[in-house]
Amino acid sequence: MSVQDELKAVPPAKLLIDGVTKDFTTSHGTLRALDHISFHIHEGDFVCLVGPSGCGKSTLLNIIAGLEIPDNGLTLMDGKPVTKPGRDRMVMFQEPALFPWLDVMGNVLFGLKLKPNLNKKECCEVARFYLRLVGLEAFAHSNIHELSGGMKQRVALARSLAPNPRVLLMDEPFAALDALTREQLYGDIQRIWAERAKTIVFVTHNVREAVCLGNRVILFSPHPGRVREEFQIDLPHPRDINSVELAKYASRITRALRGYVDAPETELGAE
Amino acid sequence: MKRLLSSSLFFIALLLGWHLLALTKRWSPILLPDPLSVWDYLKTALFDGTLFQATLVTLRRLVTGYGIGILIGIPVGMLTARFRLMEDTVGVLALGLQALPSVCWVPLALRWFGQTEGAMLFVVVMGSLWSIIISTDNGIRNVPPIFARAARTMGAKQFYTWTRVILPASAPFVVSGMKQGWAFAWRSLMAAEIFVTILTGFGLGQLLEYGRDLNAMDQVIGVMFAIVLIGLLVDKFLFSPIEHFLHRRWGTGRM
């Protein structure tokens, strides 16, 4: 496959989550993290899973990624059950999880090297393309510790985009960043979603973040983790997190969420 | 510059004090030789090649024993970190034997191997192996689990994850373990060379013991200088560059 084909290939995707249930055994007994979760995600969707901590949204993301196995129910990707991690579903974690013994380029290349049918030169070209996409081409040979938190997450984004996955799974990737950097990344991720036609599942506890990014927002409630309500966000992309329209949506969803949980306000707050 | 000055002043004062103490003749020059006679010994030994020869013999033994220690220690450390059964068996053994000063292996080595190179090798391997196992094990346990998870999502299989993620991620620990192993190997070899006298090679430790037999404390102290110097040089030219590289990549100031 040539580099051009590799870069152009538009990935189709469809995810079906069907009756997924997951229990955790703790010293206090069994805890139900996810209770019969069912919904589906269409190709090109940007779905945000929102809920307070303990509602199992990260666990669900790990199950879709194939990093964890549900006790009951299944996840289908294009009609095939998910049993293990795969390059068609790349994960971005809350921590960048970049490898400090590799430079920026080496990190982006890591996943690409595992992909068959690309030679070394093509891999480098593809890696450079994604570094340009996240605006870090000039830092290709920097060490990881020399980058700021926001730049690290950008490298992590480039790394997960590089193998050209159909689905991008993001587990609160911006939670540890400052507000300004986060807003820049909101712009980047919306642009990349549109340009690269990805399907994105995005986990967050920040309602405004969810409204800013997703075209669907799915509300979870904790103990046990359940899907409560779904919102369609009909605002044009790219969206500005500070817009009034967006705030209206956010306050409506926050109100709905409060109805399902009596969690402290700070956990559900917009910021 | 100021630090260089203060440390050179300190050592000049030390040598001067030693010299003055020797000049008082309170102790026999056999017991407390003048620094100048130590210097004389070092000069002669350097020129007639005895010191050089002994250093070569010692380093050959050290590199062999230490090499075996690393070749066994690193894979075994990986196994004890990975498998519970290995941890509970070999891991516990390593933890116990690491606490044993390496000179304690000498009597056993002498009985088992006699006055041979084998005895010496045995002591060096036993002296370095356990600490290499333990620090490798420790290094691998300190690798953040998120690295392996990230690698798995990118399609890395078990073997690939181990060689390309877990091993490099544990490098700072493994290198400091190797450094410690080197120090232990060095100490145990000196002990072994003092106790094991053989004709196949005359090492620094034997030169030291020989000096005692001859009542030549200038030789003993001179050889001690040589041993310190070799230790410093190895640290400077072997371990420092590696550590420096790791610090730069990882962005750490400590190890």
Image: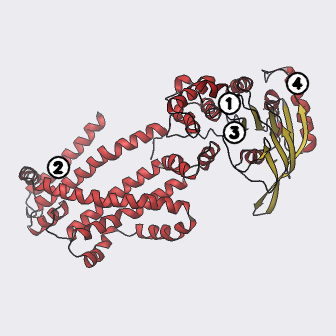
Whether label 4 touches label 2, CB < 8 Å? no
Residue type at tag 1: Asp
Distance (Cα) linking label 4 and label 3: 28 Å
Name of the residue lying farthest toward the front: A1
Residue under the image location 49 percent in, 67 percent down: B91
B188 vs A180, left or right, is left
Q: Which residue is under mark 1?
A: A178
**In the rendering, which numbered label is found on residue A234?**
4
Give how far across and how far down residue B79 sits, in percent.
50, 61
Disc nearer the start of the sequence (1/4): 1
Q: Residues within 10 Å of mark 4 (few under 14, many from 20)?
A: few
**In the rendering, which numbered label is found on residue A88?**
3
Element marked by disc 3: loop
Please report, as a chain letter, where disc 4 is located. Answer: A
Whether label 2 touches label 3, CB < 8 Å? no
Distance (Cα) linking label 3 and label 1: 30 Å
Whether residue A70 is situated above or below residue A252 in the rendered picture: below
Whether label 1 touches label 4, CB < 8 Å? no
Residue under the image location 73 percent in, 36 percent down: A167
Distance (Cα) linking label 1 and label 2: 58 Å
Distance (Cα) linking label 4 and label 2: 84 Å
Please report, as a chain letter, where disc 1 is located. Answer: A
Q: Which residue is under mark 2?
A: B15
Residue type at tag 2: Leu
Residue under the image location 46 percent in, 48 percent down: B171
Q: Nearer the viewer, mark 2 or mark 3?
A: 3
Q: Nearer the viewer, mark 4 or mark 3?
A: 3
- Give the position of the N terminus of chain B as an image quadrant: top left
Q: Nearer the viewer, mark 1 or mark 2?
A: 1
